[in-house]
Image (cartoon, grey):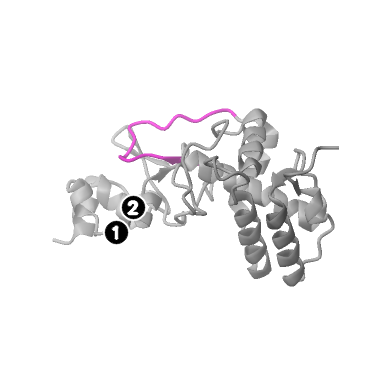
Amino acid sequence: MSVETWAGLGSHRGAGESLASWLRAGPLGARACPARGARGRRADSLFCPACWVDEAGRRRWYSREAWSNNSVVCTVHGLPLLYCDTVPKRVRGRRWSQSLREEFDALAKWAPQDHLRAESEAITRAICARSDPREAYSAAWSEAQWYLWAEGWPVAAAPKMRLHGVLHPIVQSDRLALTAIVRRIVVNLETGRHTGWPALPVRPRVLIWLQARIQRLQIDCRMGVAGCFRDAMSKRG
């Protein structure tokens, strides 16, 4: 009997549910899941409050195939994803303001084209570049995440884990914050829409590098890089 058949005996596969998530819900549990790398396991451990199936009067939450390792918002419901080591018995939802729901939805649909992907990577590197080697995170990231937290985003007031040179943080709230920060800056550069916070401080050499990088990508920015970042060594107006 195949593992798919075993899974079918114990659970109903949810719409868009990943194979690993479905297998884990069957009689064999985690033993039915094929060997997967750490990044694969992470994608299978993301849950949305609205992605569930009814099995004999009980709800079972599941992970979707469409969610990549870097997903932060449900592609169907536009809700922030939660990371759980084991399948949760209950995923509590929250009532979000209309403005946050709209931004969550935009974040779920945000799929940069090739030139935007390169632009996003450059902005991510600028945000992650430490402004002070003695600090775990850059001032740009810390400040922007605090602004998101103050707006009511489901993120911590400051990043929770050290990066150690990795551009994709492990903690889900940090991942959500970094993705939202990068998207707002890309939208600002492309459309001129304000990020909602002051220019973020970065080291002078990072600012010079980012400006040169954006110019090399030949991106038509309605708002210059200086509208989103400032020299961390200079005093505010």
Residue 85: in magenta span: yes
Q: Which residue is mark 2?
A: 41
Q: Main secondary structure of the magenta part?
A: loop
| Image quarter hosting the N terminus | bottom left
Residue 73 in view (yes/no): no
Count of marks, rendered view: 2
Q: Cβ–Cβ below 8 Å for labels 2 and 1?
A: yes
Quadrant where the C terminus lies? top right
> Residue at the location (61% across, 54% down)?
124
Instruction: Report x, y in % for residue 57.
Output: 32, 32
Q: Quadrant of residue 38?
A: bottom left
Which is more toward the observer, 183 or 161? 161
Q: Position of residue 101 (x, y in %)?
A: 64, 38
| Three-letter code for the amino acid on which mark 1 is drawn | Arg
- Residue 112 in picture, x, y percent from top left: 64, 62
Q: Which residues are magenta?
A: 80-95
Using the image as rendered, state which of residue 224 and residue 204 is in the foreground: 204
What residue do we see at 75% from left, 48% from top?
A: 231
Q: Crowding at label 2, few (<14), some or many (≥20) Cα neighbours within 10 Å?
A: some
Q: Whole-percent x and y of residue 229? A: 75, 48
The residue to which callout 1 is attached is 36
Q: Which residue is drawn at the image coordinates 18% and 46% (left, top)?
A: 27
**Does residue 138 belong to the magenta stretch?**
no
In the rendered structure, find residue 165 and report the number of the disc placed on it.
none
Q: Nearer the viewer, residue 3 or 33?
A: 33
Along the polypeptide, which appears first: circle 2 or circle 1? 1
Q: Camera-side residue: 227 or 51?
A: 227
Q: Amino acid at mark 2?
A: Arg
Asked if 223 appears above or below 175 in the picture, the reply is below
